[in-house]
Image: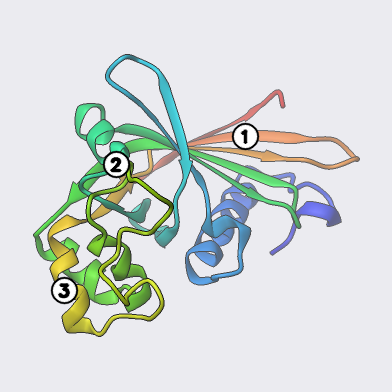
């Protein structure tokens, strides 16, 4: 990728290319900082909630991102109540922040969920076997996983019961807010996806 420490990108099309390349690299690379964005939601009292999730897929053509969650989690409940979310990504090598806004759709028990589940590594499926669900009180530190599965990766058959708790979250990207940090001068731009596939881009004051 260009930009970052070599100098800020100076065209709106170039910034959009930079942002999507970073997102796609993040979804594909386990060690990429872009793989672990912060997801922000709002709870029923209007309070903000934020936590790290794992980016599983980035589709520039469709302007879609995907991550996974447990249907019993607070973030799943919050996205059911208010499906507009924000994801904040930061790539330190490039000093690049990408903020995403858009509606999130929870897919559970459908074709999209099954495809995402089948594509997930067994070690990732394992967390959905925990009982009780995420955020529940427990008496002592622990994973909540069945005996033995906290120390080894389950087989496909062993992980399958967790599918009932699994959701693939697909975000329809409405806005990319891209912030490039650089000693030569910071740059900020917004890129909004329109319904007809076009993009309305603007430079902003950083």
* Helix, strand or loop at mark 3: helix
**Pick the front one: 46 or 2:** 46
On the image, the x and y values in percent for residue 127 come to 32, 63
Q: Residue at x 31, y 47 (%)?
A: 134
Give the answer, above or below, for where 116 lies relative to 34: below
User: Is label 2 or label 1 in front?
Assistant: 2
- The quadrant of the picture occupied by the N terminus is bottom right
Residue ranking furthest to the front: 139
Neighbor class of circle 2 (other Cα within 10 Å; few <14, some 14-19, many 20+) is few
Categorize mark 3 by other alpha carbons within 10 Å: few (<14), some (14-19), many (20+). some
- N-terminal of the two: label 3 or label 1? 3
Residue occupied by mark 2:
136
Residue 86 in the image: state x and y as whole percent: 43, 35
Pick out the residue farthest to the top: 45
Q: CA distance from mark 3 to mark 1?
A: 43 Å
Tell me the SS state at disc 2. Answer: loop
Residue wearing tag 3: 160
Report, in whole angstroms, how far the alpha carbon at label 2 lies from the one at label 1. 41 Å
Residue 188: horizontal and vertical position, in percent? 67, 33
Q: Name the side, left or right, on which 155 lies relative to 90.
A: left
């Amino acid at each position: 990728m260009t930009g970052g420490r070599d100098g800020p990108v100076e065209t709106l099309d170039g910034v959009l290319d930079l942002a999507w390349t970073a997102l796609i690299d993040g979804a594909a690379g386990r060690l990429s900082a872009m793989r672990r964005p912060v997801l922000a939601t709002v709870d029923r009292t209007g309070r903000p909630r934020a936590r790290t999730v794992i980016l599983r897929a980035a589709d520039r053509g469709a302007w879609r991102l995907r991550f996974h969650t447990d249907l019993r989690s607070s973030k799943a409940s919050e996205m059911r109540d208010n499906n507009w979310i924000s994801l904040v990504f930061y790539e330190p090598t490039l000093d690049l922040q990408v903020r995403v806004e858009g509606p999130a759709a929870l897919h559970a028990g459908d074709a999209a969920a099954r495809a995402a589940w089948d594509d997930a590594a067994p070690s990732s499926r394992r967390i959905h076997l925990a009982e009780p669900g995420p955020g529940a009180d427990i008496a002592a530190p622990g994973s909540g996983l069945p005996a033995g599965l906290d120390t080894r990766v389950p087989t496909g058959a062993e992980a399958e019961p967790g599918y009932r708790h699994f959701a693939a979250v697909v975000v329809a990207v409405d806005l990319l807010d891209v912030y490039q940090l650089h000693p030569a001068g910071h740059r900020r731009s917004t890129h909004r996806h329109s319904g007809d596939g076009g993009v309305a881009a603007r430079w902003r004051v950083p």
